[in-house]
Amino acid sequence: MVGKTLSEEEDIEIGDIVAYEKGDGLIRKTVIHRVIDKPDNGLYILKGDNNTKPDLPVDRGHILYRIVKTDIAENIEK
């Protein structure tokens, strides 16, 4: 998987796959999900492809990078 760091000027579009930081304090994790909505309030609605419900809205400042390439074939057992 390859991620591209986003500049402040770069737009995030519906359908993009992004990595964002979730949590606060000492317990934080990076989550990789797809953008499913982009309301006018500056927050993004993300959802994992296999999840039934979306995540809580995410502020642009928590989005770390956009996923630009995945190589699923590397993860398939033969």
Image (cartoon, rainbow, N blue to C red):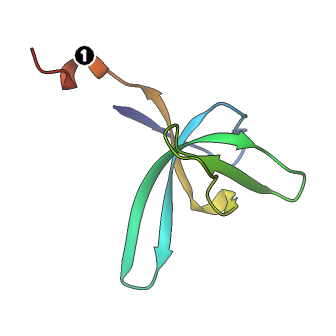
Question: Which residue sits at x=42%, y=36%?
Answer: 3
Question: Which residue sits at x=31%, y=20%?
Answer: 71
Query: Pointer 1: residues within 10 angstroms few (<14), some, or many (20+)?
Result: few
Q: Residue furthest left?
A: 78
Question: Residue type at mark 1?
Answer: Ala
Rendering coords of residue 14 (x, y %):
72, 34
Q: Nearer the viewer, residue 78 or 45?
A: 78
Residue on which disc 1 sits: 73
Rendering coords of residue 29 (x, y %):
39, 65
Q: Look at the picture and state if 50 lies above or below 59.
A: above
Q: Is residue 17 left or right of residue 70?
A: right
Q: Quick one: quadrant of the N terminus?
A: top left
Q: Nearer the viewer, residue 78 or 58?
A: 78
Q: Secondary structure at mark 1?
A: helix
Q: Is residue 40 left or right of residue 60?
A: right
Rendering coords of residue 5 (x, y %):
50, 43
Q: Look at the picture and state if 68 lies above or below 27.
A: above
Question: Which residue sits at x=37%, y=78%?
Answer: 27
